[in-house]
Image (cartoon, grey):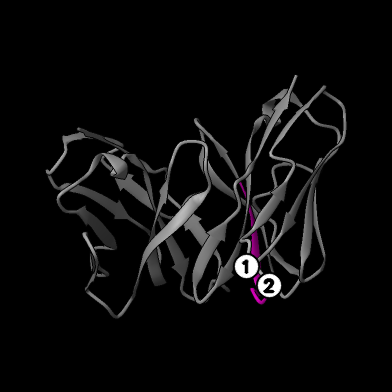
Amino acid sequence: SQQGEEDPQALSIQEGENATMNCSYKTSINNLQWYRQNSGRGLVHLILIRSNEREKHSGRLRVTLDTSKKSSSLLITASRAADTASYFCATEMLGGNNRLAFGKGNQVVVIP
Amino acid sequence: DAGVIQSPRHEVTEMGQEVTLRCKPISGHNSLFWYRQTMMRGLELLIYFNNNVPIDDSGMPEDRFSAKMPNASFSTLKIQPSEPRDSAVYFCASMGRGEAFFGQGTRLTVV
């Protein structure tokens, strides 16, 4: 079974608004990662947050990690039409030998 | 580096035929993953290798599926015999610096 589960499944927002996605997982992790997938393409790595980190920023992306609740959130600020994609969280389990397990993904549509 | 290279990009085959998907990981990456993506099941990990050795193949759905990594620069995923329910996009990914780099995928259609 997949480790991460994103919530909500689909999000439609206006350009300029912020988009927030959540992810929960079940076991202890080394790190949690977020990926983006444009239609018909492979996944692209966005950001990695380690289990001892609580927040990380990369450009317009902000990721938080709460290991006590086994959850993470991805915030995209000032969204653009080009942000339209599916977003996946993935967890590398503690002692998992690099094994990456993905959630089912969030579909985000940014309306120009 | 050209990234992770998968071939073919598209494959249409008849039920019962053997299908072989190919992957060339990024040079220097020690881990390689095969995933399958469908609308119903999302992204499923089929098998992954560390240093060319299969570590976990618990995601391989049936004995019809097999994967090999004869060297650090090449891996195959074989389905024999193929069935319509195998239709999906199959992704190969290699890992470096803790990040997974995905190929463009092979869209398999079994009719």
The amino acid at mark 1 is Asp
Q: Residue furthest left?
A: A17
Residue, x 19% and y 49% (percent of image)?
Answer: A20
Residue A10, placed above or below residue A70 = above
The x and y percentages for residue B39 are 50, 31
Residue A51, placed above or below residue B48 = below
The amino acid at mark 2 is Ser
Residue B50, placed above or below residue A25 = below
Label 1 SS: loop
Q: Decide whether residue B51 is among the magenta residues.
A: no
**Cα separation between marks 2 and 1:** 8 Å
Read off the residue under disc 2.
Answer: B27
Q: Are marks 2 and 1 in contact (CB under 8 Å)?
A: yes
Q: Residue furthest top?
A: B111
Q: Which mark is residue A29?
A: none
Q: Do marks 2 and 1 share a chain?
A: yes
Closer to viewer: mark 2 or mark 1: 1
Q: Is residue B105 visible?
A: yes
- Chain bearing tag 2 is B
Residue, x 77% and y 67% (percent of image)?
Answer: B73
**Magenta segment range?**
B27-35
The x and y percentages for residue A3 are 44, 55
Q: Residue furthest bottom?
A: A52
The quadrant in which the C terminus of chain B is found is top right
Q: Earlier in the sequence, mark 2 or mark 1?
A: 1
Front in this rendered view, residue A13 or A71: A13
Residue, x 56% and y 40% (percent of image)?
Answer: B37
The x and y percentages for residue B98 are 49, 73
